[in-house]
Image (cartoon, rainbow, N blue to C red):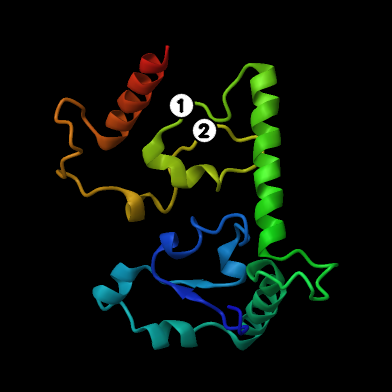
Amino acid sequence: MLAGCIPVFFHPGSAYTQYTWHLPKNFSTYSVFIPEDDIRKRNGSIEELLSQIPPEQVQIMRENVINLIPQLIYADPRSKLETLKDAFDVAVQAVIDKVTRLRKNIIQGRTEYDNFVEENSWKYALLEDGQREAGWHEWDPFFSKPKGESSGDSSTGSSAEAAKNSWKNEQRDQK
């Protein structure tokens, strides 16, 4: 991306859920997502899928990637990036926004999210402004454990339930 290349990702965890402060939520404007299972199951080759993208769209995506570069790099403080936010500026602003939001919620006597589940933590940064609960997401299959896989606690029906119980136990222990 720093060279102006359009990235191709095979799992949303590669960038979309890790770099939510630095990358736009609308990932299709600057990258290509090809689920890894499509390649493994031979539903098409990478080259074949990429060649189907119209040249006009490629040009727009490349321009979007180039526009993202300043907020992806850590600029030398002596550089002339005063008018552009670099990765450090973006991260600091995101932390300030998060602390401000948390303080506001504490003052209002509420939590940031309703029914927070640690297993779904990757979803919370993807929520729209004002949205307080993470429901189903198109990327759930990429982050969910396969059916039948043990969650480490056979007394619960799912790993999400185990996470909820863990959170409740932690809160109870702190009282």
What secondary structure is marked by label 2?
Answer: loop
Residue at 16% over, 25% down: 155
Helix, strand or loop at mark 1:
loop
Q: Which residue is mark 1?
A: 115
Q: Nearer the viewer, residue 43 or 173?
A: 173
> Does 158 sit above or below residue 12?
above
Q: Is residue 166 above or below residue 146?
A: above
Q: Residue at x 84, y 68 (%)?
A: 82
Where does residue 96 sit, x and y in percent of width and height?
A: 70, 43
Residue 106 lies, in percent from the top left, at 64, 21
Q: What is the quadrant of the N terminus in the image?
A: bottom right
Q: Which amino acid lies under the numbered mark 1 shown in the image of this protein? A: Asn
Give how far across and how far down residue 108 sits, in percent: 68, 18
Residue indicated by mark 2:
133
Q: Residue furthest front?
A: 78
**Relative to 152, is 109 on the left or the right?**
right
For marks 1 and 2, give the CA distance: 7 Å
Q: Is residue 24 left or right of residue 134?
A: right
Number of marks in the image? 2
Kindly indicate whether the residue at mark 2 contacts the one at mark 1 (C-beta within 8 angstroms): yes
**Type of amino acid at the residue the image marks with label 2:** Glu
Q: Nearer the viewer, residue 4 or 44?
A: 4
What is the quadrant of residue 165 in the picture?
Answer: top left
Q: Which mark is residue 38?
A: none
